[in-house]
Amino acid sequence: MDIRNRRHQTNLYTKEQIKRVITGSGLTIESEVDSDYILFCPFHNNNRTPAGEVDKNNGTFFCFSCHKIADLIELVMHTTGRTYFESIRFIKNKETQMDLEKEINKQLFTKPEFVPFDELILKRLYNNLVTSERAKDYFRYRKLEISSWAKFSLGYSEKQDMVTVPVHSPDGIPLGFVGRSVEGKEFKNTPGLPKSKTLFNLHRVKTADKVYVVESSFDAIRLDQCGFPAVATLGSNVSNIQIELLQKYFNNIIVVADNDEAGGNMKTKIVEKLGSRVSVIKLDKQYKDIGDMGDEEIKKLDFQFDKSIQSMLN
């Protein structure tokens, strides 16, 4: 089982036990908040501002700088050099009240389809956004309204100088986020993000009569602001699972492809796989994608089928 899921498990350890294990492993708790112990990250050269936190409820470690996630056992193994079972015994000697080995073995053999991402992290990233003029200016530049910041739980990492957009499973389970640098065009997603197994915003619009399909989350948000139910493939390489999801939930699929070769490939694959369910919006050549357009231009789009791909359906 992916250890990230243990951020949602409780009562594996007591708070005092977790605290004793941390200090017993040679780490120093620099401060603490309601739900976390704050410390320097032992997995990278973190010696200025403490970037690591340990959840008081379940012992899960997370670093906001290197994005390392570890359960309490892995943390003990890394900091003390103990083996897996030696680390379990070390933790049990810290007065655990349950058969930890049996509980861990049960979790290891439980493999959910999607591993939930810690919503607390997403909330902190959102709080960073609302207090950062740099991040707010960036989203205004991308024509994303204040109401969308909250609706989509957009965020900002000051240390990474990166804006974040949460991604969910088709049923609304938070899976992590896609990140983009404020300067330049550098992308940095949550490690292991299963973006090919879902569609951005699907959990909000899957009951709609029709759906608009774009590449980027920002374009999907822009369409949403204009009243169009939209999902994003999070890239031009559309997976077979994403095709299946479109087929499962929608009979009327409108593709808004980027005006480049990658966008053309995305459009072609969806049309070839889903055929008569699909219509295509052909953007004016002056626009690369929805992001280049104003809201009024988006609302006035003439949704006409792209004749250049008609032959694929014959």
Image (cartoon, rainbow, N blue to C red):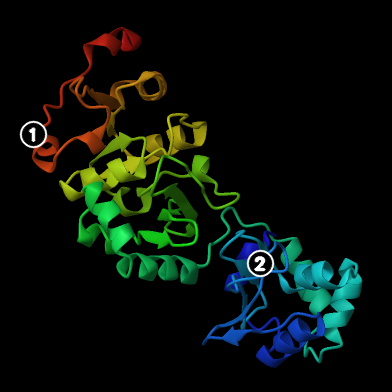
Q: Give the residue type that dot 2 points to.
A: Asn
Q: Give the residue type that dot 1 points to.
A: Lys
- In this view, 187 is above or below 307: below
What residue is shown at x 80% (from left), y 80% (from top)? 26
What residue is shown at x 83% (from left), y 69% (from top)? 77
- In this view, 150 is above or below 289: below
Q: Position of residue 218 (x, y in %)?
A: 31, 45
- Give the numbered dot on residue 300: 1
Placement of the C terminus among the 4 image quadrants = top left
- In this view, 261 is above or below 291: above
> Image check: 171 left or right of 77?
left
Q: Secondary structure at mark 1?
A: loop
Which of the 4 quarters of the picture holds residue 5?
Answer: bottom right
For label 1, count other residues whose C-alpha is less than 10 Å away and answer few (under 14), some (14-19) or many (20+): few
> Image check: 82 left or right of 4?
right
- Disc nearer the start of the sequence (2/1): 2
Q: Secondary structure at mark 2?
A: loop
Q: Position of residue 228 (x, y in %)?
A: 19, 43
Q: Position of residue 44 (x, y in %)?
A: 70, 61
Q: Which residue is mark 2?
A: 46
